[in-house]
Amino acid sequence: MSNLMGLLSLGSNGIAAQNSGIAVASNNVANANTEGYSRQRVDLEALMGTPMVGGVRSNGADRLSDALLGGRIRVANGALQMSTSQSASFDDLQSRLTDGTSLSDQLASMYASFSQASSSPTDSISRADVIQNVQDMSANVRRKASELAQMYDEFNSTIRDKVAQASDLAQKLAETNLQIQKTNDPVAKDQRDKIAKELSGIVGGSAHFAADGSMRFVLDGGAVLVDGNHAAKLGTSTDPASGDTTVQVVDGNTKRDVTKDIHGGTVGSDLSVRDGTLKTARKDLDQFAFDLAGKANAIHKTSAGLDGSTGNNLFEDPGTVDGAASRLAINSDIVDDPNKLALGAVGGGAGSNAGALSMYQLANQKVATGGVTLGESALGVIGKVGRAAATAKSDLDRDTLVSDHLSSLQDSLAGVDIQEEMTNLTKFEHASSAMTKFTSTVDSLLSDMIEKL
């Protein structure tokens, strides 16, 4: 009877093991399209025993994953999110600089108006056209300066929002580490991988597994954001000197500025564009406006107006290079009295056009900073952005290719094959049915034996 009881136990364990396989296969099929789901496999253990007793039992489900591949996927995602964000930011920056009339075209129109006025320097319509073109030039520069300033503010706001989101994700990652330590739940492990991928997509960095199996998340500069079930906080502050939003890792009483250490994710992109190409574009636009006003004023002050006045600026004095684009404006005295527009030579009389010709000839003179013409300076503002955009597009193509390749490797390892899982489901169902019949037969024999006693 003891042998029959052992066989009954063997059958019971077998049924439970095959039913575990059915549950795992069914779960795989149900989650075939779930983002971040890793295929599971039932862990069946052969039981040691006498020739008549042994069998199999289920130790739960194993999650199919590879720590090295997972780490590469997270790093690649940080790079992909950064290049994607950069490409979009450069497109936006280009759009803001080219919206409406370009600086070079506006400058050409201003030069052309001086050329036209040189043919009839006393004509009120020609003089009004010059004044209008100078006003349009100034307004265009100010508008683009305003667009770039707005983009700068948007970056600061976005960085603050994303850093707050990343800080929440870091806390969730630590909480999931603790949950996995307690339960070893494969679903929680999937969730942890998903959180770490989202976190790297925002701030870059990398995640590694500690000896106890918990995940440790470190930013590119070495600052530890998550260590086991402990998470530091990510915060922001405003640099009083520059107005830049900066990023800090706050852990207890320790605060570390990591603004220059974030080289991945969307925050890395925002910081890179804000402190790189956008800052350069704003400086170049300011320099262009400063050079334009300075060189045009130098010619205008040594020329004579129709009223005989001289020494007047064409543009308002921009003062310093910093912020010159936002302050560029025509001299209000000329708007109030067009006769002060200096198109002639001092002492040249009402019909003199020397001033207008000198202003027109400015187009071909290398008077801008860097030894270029003002037109070349205007083209340089957008040209640098265009080159940066082309590089970002190349980076995006590369990072997309790498990410797609790693995703394919991940799918081959942990992706769900419906046909395979349906085969497994059928196999476990048949095995369960067989074990049920085996158990029923043993139970019948045991009942007969008991009745005969």
Image (cartoon, grey):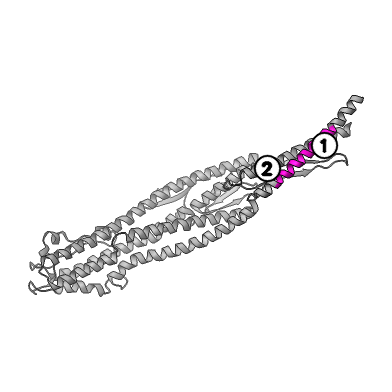
Task: Classify the position of the C terminus by image quarter.
Answer: top right
SS type, badge 1: helix
The one nearer the camera, 452 or 197, is 452
Asked if residue 373 is positioned above or below residue 64 in the image, the reply reads below
Main secondary structure type of the part rendered in magenta: helix
* Residue range highlighted in magenta: 423-442
The one nearer the camera, 87 or 177, is 87
Circle nearer the N terminus (1, 2): 2
SS type, badge 2: helix
The residue under label 1 is which amino acid type? Phe
- Asked if the magenta segment contains residue 430, the reply would be yes
Mark nearer the viewer, 1 or 2:
1
Asked if residue 6 is positioned above or below residue 348 in the image, the reply reads above
230 sits to left or right of 82: right
Q: Position of residue 449 (x, y in %)?
A: 90, 28
Residue 248 visible in the displayed image: yes
Which numbered circle lies on residue 24?
2
Which numbered circle lies on residue 438?
1
The one nearer the camera, 257 or 301, is 301
160 sits to left or right of 306: right
- Asked if the magenta segment contains residue 64, the reply would be no
Q: Residue at x 55, y 56 (%)?
A: 75
